[in-house]
């Protein structure tokens, strides 16, 4: 399994989860986990996504998600899970 | 979830708001295979580098895309040109320089580094040819950088090299002198230009990485508001660990893709002119209200000790300068404090004794003359050979008077013209020869 972590930051409003999830489904990226948190008053949604069967590269998936994010008025970033393994675990 | 939302948001904040990125992925590559009896054959052989550069650029772009990490520059370090010029003529130096510069431009490499020579005690023919063509080579190129190692703990300090170097940088505009440096104890595996070169003892090709993360450290300190020095040290150490790990990850992945060795992460924090990306900003977050105030040295010593301890845990591949790398113009707070007069040459030299990497990216007024600049460089290099440290000087001679500044734009920022002490030092700097290696040398056996 190869995972990516999607971070969505912005003002909370209906349709954000659906918008991002549908873009992921289109590319055959499977949501494994999802959680929400509020950081300094700003809504942040975090998703862990299995990209091992994804139709496009992570760079392309990120581009598409960021385009969708613009429509939704939120900021989207997508990282490879290894970034967190390296930085958050000894 | 394997990671908490807080952990994920923390990393995201470092990468998006706190300017954490990879300053440079540097391919260090042996080019000595290209040494030939004449210029034409040498350039012909160097042409084969193109394929390697192409694979390097592709690997860096792929890794940046895959991991979602910004990689600010791609650099290449080649074997010192000195070795080429041992058997070629002086005029061939600038020709090789232009050729390498062209390669960098063609393959979109930001800097290609290695117009360099070692002249710690004296000159070989090749070293002399490099130093005498230094201005010409850098003035006719845009992406080439070069270094003269004029001092080392084992060999001493070559005053003649310093004088020739100053003659050359006085003939350079800021766009060239910002690509030149003079060093003591230069390391063979630095990812930073202008000192980067493919050093002796290295494998055929390696990847060296420089991380830019002062903003992460500053924010960590400001958020945690430590009450004791131990707490402060711990906060910095933990943040430095994470910053260094990012360098380790990217370096390993680029090297893996190219099928070559990953050699080093440089622990230096590498500031940029962006707001919130300043090493001086960290010192001020530690409670020194203006960088340069009394206590700055102690604060920097705490900072770098914690950075090194956190970094040492994060990677087994420490290399390069791994000190407080503070190019004054490239650090917005540092530049401001220099303009305000809180940071002067003696502050920088004192900071170098703790762990700064020397006097970097500071302008001097040509009207103050060359001799004082020779003295300044000798001061820093003397510290290098006395303390057994890597130290360097990158000065930018300009026509403007002390107290003004020249804006170089981009990563290089505003270069402040610092006043050199108005004291005649001609008697000392006109002495010929070299400074013998110090007692430190004898500790090495």
Image (tube, coloured by chain):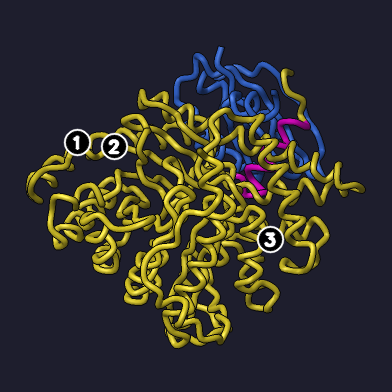
Chain colours: A blue, B yellow
Look at mark 3 in the image and give the residue it sits on: B280
Examine the residues drawn in magenta and state their main secondary structure.
helix
Q: Secondary structure at mark 1?
A: helix
The answer to whether the residue labelled 1 contacts the one labelled 2, judged by CB atoms less than 8 Å apart, is yes
Question: In this view of the protein, which residue sits in the foreground, A70 or B275?
Answer: B275
Specify start and end residues of the magenta stretch as a single range: B6-20
Name which residue lies at 82% across and 38% down. Answer: A38
Q: Secondary structure at mark 2?
A: loop
Categorize mark 2 by other alpha carbons within 10 Å: few (<14), some (14-19), many (20+).
many
> Tag on residue B33?
1
Could you tell me how far apart the alpha carbons at marks 2 and 3 are, in whole angstroms? 36 Å
Q: Residue furthest top?
A: A1
Q: Quadrant of the N terminus of chain B?
A: top right
Could you tell me how far apart the alpha carbons at marks 1 and 2 are, in whole angstroms? 7 Å
Categorize mark 3 by other alpha carbons within 10 Å: few (<14), some (14-19), many (20+).
many
User: Which quarter of the picture shows residue A1?
Assistant: top right
Q: Is A85 positioned to the left or the right of B91 in the image?
A: right
Callouts 1 and 2 in the same chain: yes
> Tag on residue B30?
2
Q: Residue furthest right?
A: B227
- Which chain hosts label 3? B
Could you tell me how far apart the alpha carbons at marks 3 and 1 are, in whole angstroms? 43 Å
Q: Secondary structure at mark 3?
A: helix
Q: Earlier in the sequence, mark 3 or mark 1?
A: 1
Name which residue lies at 50% across and 22% down. Answer: A27
The answer to whether the residue labelled 3 contacts the one labelled 1, judged by CB atoms less than 8 Å apart, is no
Q: Where in the figure is residue B405, as x and y percent of width and height?
A: 53, 79
User: Which quarter of the picture shows residue B236?
Assistant: top right
- Which chain hosts label 2? B
- Which chain hosts label 1? B
């Amino acid at each position: 399994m190869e995972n990516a972590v999607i971070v969505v930051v912005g003002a909370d409003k209906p349709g954000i989860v659906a918008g991002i999830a549908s873009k992921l489904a289109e590319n055959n990226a499977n949501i494994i986990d999802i959680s929400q948190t509020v950081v300094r008053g700003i809504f942040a949604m975090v998703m862990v996504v299995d990209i091992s069967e994804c139709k496009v590269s992570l760079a392309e998936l990120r581009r598409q998600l960021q385009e969708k994010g613009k429509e939704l008025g939120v900021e989207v970033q997508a990282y490879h899970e290894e970034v967190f393994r390296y930085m958050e675990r000894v | 979830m394997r990671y908490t939302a807080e952990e994920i948001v923390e990393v995201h904040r470092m990468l998006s708001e706190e300017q954490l990125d990879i300053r440079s992925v540097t391919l260090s590559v042996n080019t000595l295979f290209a040494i030939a009896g004449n210029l034409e054959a040498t350039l012909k052989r160097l042409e084969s580098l193109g394929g390697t550069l192409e694979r390097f650029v592709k690997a860096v772009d792929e890794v940046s895309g895959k991991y979602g990490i910004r990689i600010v520059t791609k650099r290449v370090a080649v074997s010192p040109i000195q070795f080429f010029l041992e058997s070629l003529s002086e005029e061939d130096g600038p020709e090789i320089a232009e050729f390498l510069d062209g390669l960098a431009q063609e393959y979109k490499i930001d800097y290609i580094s290695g117009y360099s020579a070692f002249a710690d005690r004296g000159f070989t023919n090749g070293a002399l040819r490099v130093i005498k063509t230094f201005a010409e080579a850098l003035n006719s190129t845009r992406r080439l950088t070069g270094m003269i190692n004029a001092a080392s703990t084992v060999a001493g300090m070559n005053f003649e090299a310093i004088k020739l170097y100053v003659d050359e940088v006085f003939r350079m505009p800021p766009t060239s002198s910002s690509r030149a440096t003079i060093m003591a104890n230069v390391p063979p595996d630095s990812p930073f230009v202008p000192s980067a070169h493919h050093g002796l003892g290295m494998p055929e090709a390696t990847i060296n990485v420089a991380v830019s993360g002062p903003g992460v450290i500053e924010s960590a300190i400001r958020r945690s508001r430590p009450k004791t020095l131990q707490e402060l040290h711990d906060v910095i150490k933990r943040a430095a660990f994470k910053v260094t790990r990012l360098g380790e990850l990217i370096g390993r992945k680029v090297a893996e893709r190219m099928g070559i060795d990953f050699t080093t992460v440089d622990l230096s924090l590498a500031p940029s002119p962006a707001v919130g990306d300043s090493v001086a900003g960290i010192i001020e977050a530690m409670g020194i209200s203006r960088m340069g105030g009394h206590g700055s040295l102690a604060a920097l010593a705490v900072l770098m000790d914690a950075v090194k301890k956190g970094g040492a845990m994060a990677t087994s591949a420490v290399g390069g300068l791994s000190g407080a790398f503070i190019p004054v113009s490239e650090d917005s707070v540092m530049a401001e404090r220099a303009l305000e007069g809180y940071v002067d040459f003696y502050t920088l030299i004192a900071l170098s004794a703790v762990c700064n990497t020397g006097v970097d990216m500071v302008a001097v007024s040509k009207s103050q003359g060359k001799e004082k600049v020779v003295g300044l460089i000798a001061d820093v290099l003397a510290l290098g050979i006395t303390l057994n440290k890597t130290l360097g000087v990158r000065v930018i001679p300009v026509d403007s008077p002390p107290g003004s500044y020249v804006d170089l734009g981009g990563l290089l920022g505003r270069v402040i013209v610092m006043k050199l002490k108005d004291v005649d030092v001609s008697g000392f700097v006109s002495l010929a020869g070299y400074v013998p290696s110090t007692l430190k040398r004898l500790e090495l056996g």
